[in-house]
């Protein structure tokens, strides 16, 4: 399951993925996120991804995440905060970020509070 919210004033994208994500559902998520990123293109986009409860993903789903992170960077994303509660998923996300070229703008957090503080702090690296 997924949910995407956007704060257009701050160019902040908040999304949540949880449970087992099947390929068709991931394609729907991908299409919606693509549209959001395109609408914010050229701005200082920040993404806060709540992935607590998400199960490790299949290779096809991981590839969609990789492509969308790459696209997010091209649209102007400067920070990606990922809230995770699984070490296995964190390792998978680390690999996806590295392969997409987004590893230098991505941080993982155990809580939403820490992620939100980092994502909104313009002085935090």
Image (cartoon, rainbow, N blue to C red):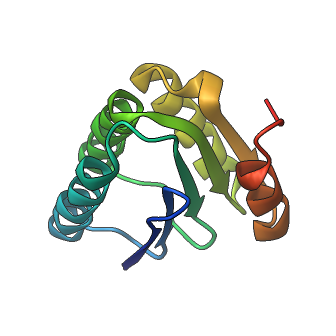
Question: Position of 37 compared to 90: left or right?
Answer: left
Q: Residue sitting at 69 percent across and 58 percent down?
A: 86
Q: Quadrant of the N terminus?
A: bottom left
**What's the residue at 63%, 22% (across, down)?**
104
Residue 85: % across, % down:
72, 63
Residue at left 71%, top 51%?
119
**x, y (%) of residue 32?**
22, 65
The percent coordinates of residue 31 (x first, y second) are 17, 59
Q: Is residue 14 above or below residue 103?
A: below
Indicate whether 72 appears above or below 10. above
Q: Position of residue 5 (x, y in %)?
A: 44, 75
Which residue appears farthest toward the front when viewing the image? Answer: 9
The picture quadrant where one finds residue 92 is top right
Nearer the observer, 16 or 61: 16
Which residue appears at 34% of the width and 68% of the height?
Answer: 21
88 or 10: nearer the viewer: 10
Numbered-mark total:
0
Left or right of residue 35: residue 86: right
| In the rendered image, the vertical position of residue 75 relative to residue 4, given as above or below | above
Q: Quadrant of the C terminus?
A: top right
């Amino acid at each position: 399951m997924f949910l995407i919210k956007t704060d257009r004033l701050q160019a902040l994208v908040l999304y949540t993925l949880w449970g087992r994500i099947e390929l068709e559902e991931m394609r729907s998520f991908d299409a919606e996120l693509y549209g959001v990123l395109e609408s914010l293109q050229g701005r200082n986009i920040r993404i806060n991804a709540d992935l607590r409860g998400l199960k490790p993903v299949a290779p096809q789903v991981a590839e969609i995440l990789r492509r969308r992170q790459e696209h997010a960077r091209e649209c102007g994303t400067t920070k990606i905060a990922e809230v995770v509660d699984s070490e296995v998923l964190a390792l998978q996300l680390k690999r996806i970020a590295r392969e997409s070229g987004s590893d230098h703008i991505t941080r993982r957090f155990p809580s939403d509070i820490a992620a939100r503080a980092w994502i909104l702090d313009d002085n935090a690296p």
